[in-house]
Amino acid sequence: MFSFPKPSYEQFFHTYPIQTFAVSRDEQQLMYSTNVSGSYEVWRMNLSNGFSQPITSIGQSNFGMTFSKDGQSLITSFDNDGDENAQIYALPANGGELLPLLTGESDRFMIGELTDDGNTLYYTTSKDNSTFLNICSYDLVTGHQNVMIEGKDAAHMFLTASKSGKVAYMKLFANSHSPGFILADGKTIPLANDNEQSHNVSGGQFIGEDTFYYLTNEGSETSELVKIDVTTEKIEKLTDEPHEDFTSMSYDKQKQLLYLVSSSGVEDTLYVYDIQTGTLVQTELPVSIVEKLHIGESGAIYLLGRGATSPFNLYRKRENEKWVPLTEFSIPGIDQKELSEPEMITYRSFDDTEIEALYFKAHRENNNGKLVLWPHGGPQASERKSFRAMFQAMTYAGFSIIAPNFRGSSNYGKRS
């Protein structure tokens, strides 16, 4: 009946990113930050029926969120008009006025985690130490703030803490050198056999008080799962997957499982490590790139991710069920079938290392026969199957794109 015009170039950029999310302990509600209303707001989703509504009207980017233990409020952080100086507030779960918790002009407060009893918030801040940062705790009952670790030598960043207050953290010397440590009973324990050697530490989970699991690439091109006995300081490597690079860890306390996301290659993979048996098994993902993974109290998996032809969306997977989308954001007015799903091209480097490139083929009806070469920046970066509005707009306009990885790209070898 109607003849609509073809999508404009600008239309491909009308997508709605999701910055982060949090799930209540009873798994009845999910909060997430998105700009679907035109500016970033916190939205509340009722997980029983999927209904979402905004609960803020401040138009500011979100830098982290976690539910209070009773689920009646959200501890969250916002900056001010893009200044990246995140301030921490409490927000009623049904919306309303923000209650300032940790704020300061020109200071930055980064949410770490909330203790299991819901009374203490760990955070990292630039307050009184703008160069190296301090790791602190905040008593939500009394309002008392405590500097636990004063940053020196390099920027410090909180990782996690045990129930008794042992703190795991890292020092950010460079993109290629961020060693980790545990502060336990006044003693600093390194998470490496040789802290002078460049390496990175990420993730982290205390299992009890004496065992700490974490990810590190010490002595390797890629990160593996490692554990340390906090008492004896003995370090043990638990995985040996040279073609995987583990980047994040999530813990299922009930089943004693660790969910490990690997970023090797142009797509992410998800593995499950059984702490009791020591087995590592790959499991399915609904997306190519994982931005955040959360394990609910029930064992359900909540995920924020995207793919080459799909923008940010939220998903859930319950036990013995398939992945289900909780949001279905797309490019308005453009069918996903009209987008370019990249082909993967491989070639060998001088030492026989396999390198991958992504080839985005131009839209068939508009193909103008021209090819764009798109080398990525970095150096600690790589070209992957994440949604790129510009790539999709260009292929729809008739340009094919080849986006190569090369030596020096993340996961493709440091030597060129």
Image: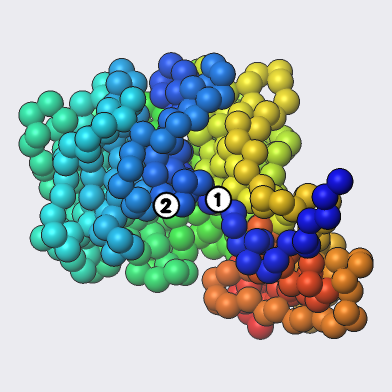
Task: Tell me the quarter of the picture where residue 73 sits.
Answer: top left
Let me know if residue 112 appears in the view. Answer: no
The amino acid on which the numbered mark 1 sits, given as a three-letter code, is: Tyr
x%, y% of residue 298?
52, 17
Q: Do callouts 1 and 2 mark residues in contact (Cβ within 8 Å)?
A: no
Which residue corresponds to the image point at 73% horizontal and 36% vertical from the top-left?
284
Which residue corresponds to the image point at 85% horizontal and 83% vertical from the top-left?
370
x%, y% of residue 242?
69, 56
Which residue corresponds to the image point at 62% horizontal and 43% vertical from the top-left?
329
Q: Nearer the viewer, residue 117 or 153?
A: 117
Which residue corresponds to the image point at 16% horizontal and 40% vertical from the top-left?
101
x%, y% of residue 291?
55, 48
Compared across the picture, whether 346 is left or right of 117 comes to right
The quarter of the picture where the C terminus appears is bottom right
Residue beneath label 1, please? 16
Indicate which disc, 1 or 2, sits on the residue closer to the N terminus.
Answer: 1
Compared across the picture, whether 61 is left or right of 335 comes to left
- Residue 206: give its label: none
Q: Nearer the viewer, residue 197 or 372?
A: 372
Q: Secondary structure at mark 1?
A: loop
| Crowd band around label 2 with a 10 angstrom C-alpha radius: few (<14), some (14–19), many (20+) | some
The amino acid on which the numbered mark 2 sits, given as a three-letter code, is: Ser
Q: Secondary structure at mark 2?
A: loop
How many circles with numbers are drawn on the protein? 2
x%, y% of residue 75?
28, 35
Determine whether 63 is above or below 196 in the image. Answer: above
Determine whether 8 is above or below 91 in the image. Answer: below
Let me know if residue 142 appears in the view. Answer: yes
Determine whether 251 is above or below 19 in the image. Answer: above
Residue beneath label 2, please? 39
Task: Tell me the quarter of the picture where residue 383 sits.
Answer: bottom right
Structural distance between the alpha carbons of marks 1 and 2: 10 Å
